[in-house]
Amino acid sequence: MKRILHCADLHLTHETGESDYSFRVLEEIVSLAQRENVDFLIFCGDTFDTFKSAEVLCERFRKTLKRLYNLKEGLFTILLAGNHEMLDSRDRTLSSMDFGVSALAEASSFKFKLFSFPDKELEFLAIPHRSNYSDYLEWIVPEKKSRFRLAVAHGSIAGLGVPVFDEEERGSVMDTDLFRRLSIDYALLGHIHTHFLGECDGVLLTYPGSARVWRKGEIGPRYVNIIEVCEEIKLKKVGLPSAGEYRFYRLPLTLEGNLSPTEELAESWGVNDFIHISLTGVVENQSSISSLERELRKSYEDKVRRLEIEREDIISREGISKHPLAVKFLQLWKEAEPEPEDGEAFKAWLRARSLGLKKIKERIESGR
Ligand SMILES: [Mn+2]
């Protein structure tokens, strides 16, 4: 039985603030590779956030991997270039650097490359990232000789229903026909930051998702795939606690600028989490907001990796609560109060106050 650790989109960065965090996740991946006794460690693209990050962090990366080779004889590692390693590269290539990997796969050297391990009954077809793969019909790929052929690639897949995050993820699309045509049994992919496992035309495809929280909105645990190859191919996703989670809260304020009673904050938070709070609502004056923000920072800043408090969604309008429209609205709103135990209804009710007051503010200001 052979074992593979498949990770992607780690986005190691040299920028202060996230650099040590991103490396803690790499260290966890290396420890996991050791614990799972893997034969192959595959970095499926966007391992570095930019070309510059790859340059700055190359040595630190090599040193982090080094202990693995000492422990596992015959370990084979592939570092596949994604779109991010090409950012700001200005035609320079990764091959001028020593990452300490068994194979570096980038588009400047080849469109694809086959790595065969006949004794292990498997082969990898590495397809480094490109903006366009439409010439794949002309590729002359050697016939499959091993029992299993696995693709290692970085891009989106057309028509697979993979949840796409933004325009960047939508780019550089591969056709599933490419995998079928190249006799791929299993495609190990990077680029999409959400874990995904699917099948198309008999080809299994998987994205581990980003190995760390790279941007706002990447909710849920971060994963790598551990793949076992024996009679068949088995996959398990393994969580990365050091990556933490991204958690977003929209907290409605009262007219006086206090927090409304909502769910208990911080109950489920971990030390590696990125907490993003957006304060929202119509308030009488802004002055109380600064002290509220200070209070939130004091209570939670040391408990998590990163705390971001956003105030853009707050609208202030002095004396709004005295306006006849608002008085009437707030009276009706108060009458509709659901039981606080009815969590969702209660949140919706708090939201209704903000929305109603916003509308009233607009009316007052337009002079209607
Ligand atoms: Mn990425």
Image (spheres, rainbow, N blue to C red):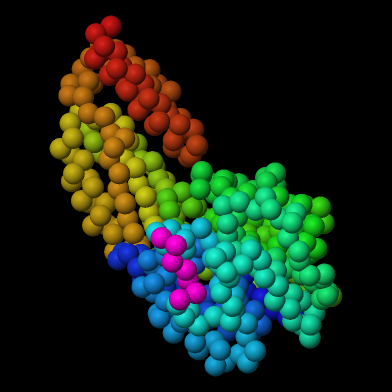
Query: Residue shown at 37%/25% (left/top)?
Result: 355
Query: Residue shown at 30%/48% (left/top)?
Result: 309
Number of dots carrying numbers: 0
Measured as percent of width and height from the top left, residue 109 is found at 57, 69
**The C terminus appears in which quarter of the rendering?**
top left
Measured as percent of width and height from the top left, residue 175 is found at 71, 50
Q: Which residues are magenta?
A: 90-96
Measured as percent of width and height from the top left, residue 31 is found at 53, 81
- Residue extending farthest to the top is 368
Query: Residue shown at 22%/28% (left/top)?
Result: 316
Q: Nearer the viewer, residue 357 or 313?
A: 313
Residue 280 is drawn in which quadrant? top left
Q: Seen in the image, is 314 located left or right of residue 175?
A: left
197, above or below 47, in the image: above
User: Can residue 143 be seen at all in this image of the molecule?
Assistant: yes
Q: Nearer the viewer, residue 338 or 37?
A: 37
Q: Seen in the image, is 29 located left or right of residue 138?
A: left
Measured as percent of width and height from the top left, residue 310 is found at 30, 44
Residue 74 is drawn in which quadrant? bottom right
**The N terminus appears in which quarter of the rendering?**
bottom right
Q: Nearer the viewer, residue 94 or 18?
A: 94
Residue 121 is drawn in which quadrant? bottom right
Query: Residue shown at 60%/46% (left/top)?
Result: 163
Q: Seen in the image, is 319 located left or right of residue 16?
A: left
- Residue 173 in the magenta stretch? The answer is no
Q: Seen in the image, is 51 located left or right of residue 199?
A: left
User: Can residue 244 be seen at all in this image of the molecule?
Assistant: no
291, above or below 40, in the image: above
